Image (tube, rainbow, N blue to C red):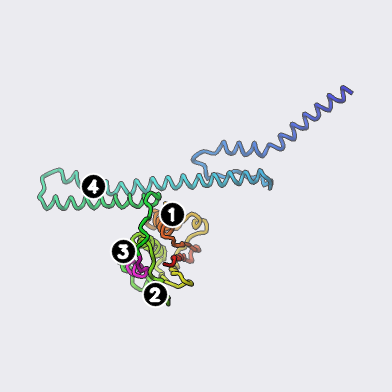
Amino acid sequence: MLLVLLSGLIIIYIVSRLLSNLAYSPIKNIINQVNEIEASSLDRNIVSPNTKDEIQELIETYNNLLKRLSDTFIIQKNFINYVSHEFKTPLTAISGNLEVFAQKDRTSAEYKQMSEKVLENVYQIEDTMNTLMMLSGLRNNTELTEIFRVDELVWDINDQLPELYQLKDAQIKIAIEIENDKLLSIKGNSNEIKIALYNIIENAVKYSNGNPIKISLLQQENQLKIVIEDHGSGITEEDLKFIKQTFYRGKNAKDIKGSGVGLSLANIIFKQNNIHFTIMSKKDEGTTVTLLFPPL
């Protein structure tokens, strides 16, 4: 009986070790894969054994965490590239002008001309700083008591864009289909909302491939709705998920000048002014942006 007992204990020990190794092998596999991931390879997913249990849920949670970390690193990298580019240009211009200017005595008119050039570059740096502060949320919007007409902002933007892109007036079509004119008046920060609208409409122009752009001011129950439509290159389903992130640029934007700030800045401004902002798009078919404004 003692021999049978000892044999049974040995068999139980061996079987339990085999079963434990078999049961914990997926977890060991996860640990090995996580240990191999470095900062440069955060976009690499952990291979799933498709166990359809808590281990599968754990792997999906890890992959979601790694994806968020990877997106954060990309945003930080783009942020550094953006800041260095935006600051380098005016700083180089300032230092270059001052170096040339200091080589000999100048007249008062030349001093005035130089100071104007330097101030222009300083203002450019200041504008960049204000944009970055707004993007980071450090600049809170407290002036929401101003009442103004949105249609006037749209017409102003329409007048500015042809000068920038040498467009014909027929390329941007504005349709006002509102019975109650009072809906065109909203409460908010007119300067910031104009910046946001400008960025949205400018994007429609840049990615329209020369096709007409339609801006519709509509009435939805007791609210103002603006729909901006273009029939250009559109946005892929993959890029559409991240298009509102700061400094994110889609694959279709490689040959078009930009920094990936416009949509993220517009998104922040619309949130601060309680404006509902949605984007729908299909690759090679175009993009539709819808803005729903709160009533007074």
Q: Is residue 28 visible?
A: yes
Residue 61 horizontal side relative to residue 152, left or right: right
Residue contact between numbered discs 3 and 2, judged by CB atoms under 8 Å: no
Q: Name the residue carrying label 3.
A: 164
Residues in magenta? 147-158
Q: Residues within 10 Å of mark 1 (few under 14, many from 20)?
A: some
Q: Position of residue 174 (x, y in %)?
A: 39, 73
Q: Are marks 1 and 2 in contact (CB under 8 Å)?
A: no
User: In this image, 51 relative to 277: left or right?
Assistant: right
Q: Which mark is on residue 249? A: 1
Q: Judge whether residue 214 can be spotted in this image.
A: no
Quadrant that contains the N terminus: top right
Instruction: Give the CA distance from mark 3 to mark 2.
Output: 30 Å
- Residue 129 pos. (x, y %): 33, 49
First of labels 1, 4 by sequence position: 4
| Closer to the camera in the image, 81 or 269 | 269
> Looking at the image, which residue is at 36% across and 70% down?
151
Q: Is residue 186 magenta?
A: no
N-terminal of the pair, mark 3 or mark 1, is: 3
Badge 4: how crowded within 10 Å, few (<14), some, or many (20+)? Answer: some
Q: Which mark is residue 94?
A: 4
**What is the spatial separation of the Cα atoms under label 4 and label 3, in whole angstroms?**
25 Å
Please identify, in this view, whether the residue under mark 1 or under mark 2 is nearer the observer: 2
Which of these two is toward me, 83 or 155? 155
Q: Is residue 215 above or below residue 259?
A: below
Instruction: State the separation of the CA atoms marked 3 and 1.
Output: 21 Å
Q: Amino acid at mark 2?
A: Asp
Location of mark 2 (residue)? 181
Question: Is 49 situated above or below 211?
Answer: above
Give the mark toward the camera: 3 or 2. Answer: 2
Q: Circle 3 sits in a helix, a strand or a loop, which is it?
A: helix
